[in-house]
Amino acid sequence: MTDLRTNETRDKATSRSRAWAGVSAITASLFVFLTTELMPVGLLSPLSTSLHISLGTAGLMVTLQGLAAGVGVVFIVAWTRRLDRRLLLSILLTVLVVGNLVTAISPSFALILATRLLMGFASGVFWAIGVSMAMRLVPKHQASRAAAVVMSGISIATVVGIPLGTILESFVGWRGTFLIWSGLSLLVMLCVIATIPSLRSTNTVPVREVFVLPLRNARLRLVLFAVVFFVLGHFGAYTFVRPFLEQSSSATPVFVTLVLMVFGAGGALGNLAAGHAVRRSLRGTFIVGCVGLVASLLVLLGVGHGQVGTTISLAFWGLSFGIVQLCQVNMTQAAAPETFEAAMSLNTMAYNTSIALGALFGGVLADHIGVTSAMWLGVALTAVALLLAITRNGMFAGAN
């Protein structure tokens, strides 16, 4: 009897370890998807110089991938709703491996944009299914913890991934950087295959029903509006942070790398703090994060000409973004708990389309008025998200 109990205990421990290894593999997947999507932010200047294009045109690498992720996600998630999620994630990572490889060796910017378009479709689907996959791997009472672990991949990407891309560019060039990321994506795909069991889809919502969710669910509709405005503002400014720092404070590539790491570290702290704070007040935590986004951009505009002021503002900006980022996932889940994957596909559509439009609007302003105007765009749009959170209580009804 003792041996039987020992074996049962060992089996349970093995099952838990495998489950959390799967969660870690999904977190690593988020890391490579996000760094691939946002890597041009840290490489914008050398990319534009090498390809003989303007900064605004180079920013289309972010715009097009975000647009594809936003436009295609609802359809692809619905069409693949009966496909095993482990197989689907492996396919998405394969697209990432090939896409980064093609980007590294591409002879033309047109081919790079076409490749980013295809990678955008894969990225959007991952954002819609990744968190729900992680939550299904672990016991129900640990589901929220698994979601928080996966979302920490965002902080890891901003702390390590994007700055690392900037550092690698200085040694191997931007093409070599994308080649390395292709290999890293392959490694993550192998980890997914090795650690994640077969996961049949639990989402049976067809396309036509996904699009009516916001019409039937007023709370989800408000959440999506808030997501749109804070993402438009954040990425409208963040996409052009390197050119802004180079022009306003004559920042060197090394300093840009360091402050991007500071931004990421702030995001990690914000993610951690929000993980505890949302249990007490989701609305209050989201409002605090939005206030921080607006304030940090104003500080950057006011004292961004010096290294100390820049570092402080980027740290505060990252902290605030980490808070808001985790809040919006919790807000989506709370608004549509029974159709979470479908709601997340809408969230992903709104989020990534807003990344694309934010980068596009920021690029137009940067090319025609100056990069400082992209920062002011960020102030204005994140302020709208803040006003929504303050004035629309229905967005958080029953959340805490």
Image (cartoon, grey):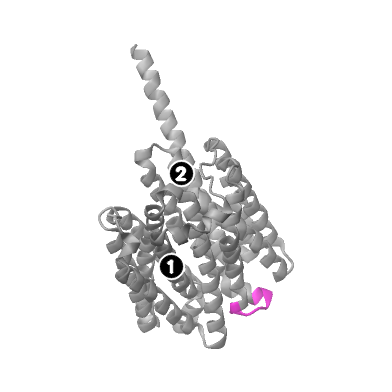
Helix, strand or loop under label 1: helix
Q: Residue most toward the top? A: 1
Residue 14: percent from left, percent from top: 43, 29
Tag count: 2
Q: Is there any visible trace of residue 169 in the rendered image?
A: no
Residue 278 x/y as whole percent: 30, 56
At label 2, the amino acid type is Ala
Please determine whether, in this image, residue 108 is positioned above or below residue 328: below
Identify the residue under disc 1. 225
Q: Is residue 67 visible?
A: yes
What residue sits right under mark 2 in the picture?
Answer: 134
Identify the magenta region. Answer: 49-56
Residue 4 figure quarter: top left
Q: Residue at x 66, y 57 (%)?
A: 99
Give SS at disc 2. helix
Q: Quadrant of the N terminus?
A: top left
**Residue in the picture at 41% in, 56% down:** 332
Q: Nearer the viewer, residue 398 or 126?
A: 398
Residue 307, image quadrant: bottom left
Going by the numbered disc 1, the residue's amino acid type is Phe
Q: Residue 365, percent across and down? A: 53, 83
Q: In the shown orientation, is residue 341 left or right of residue 386? A: right
Q: Mark 2 to mark 1: distance in Å? A: 26 Å
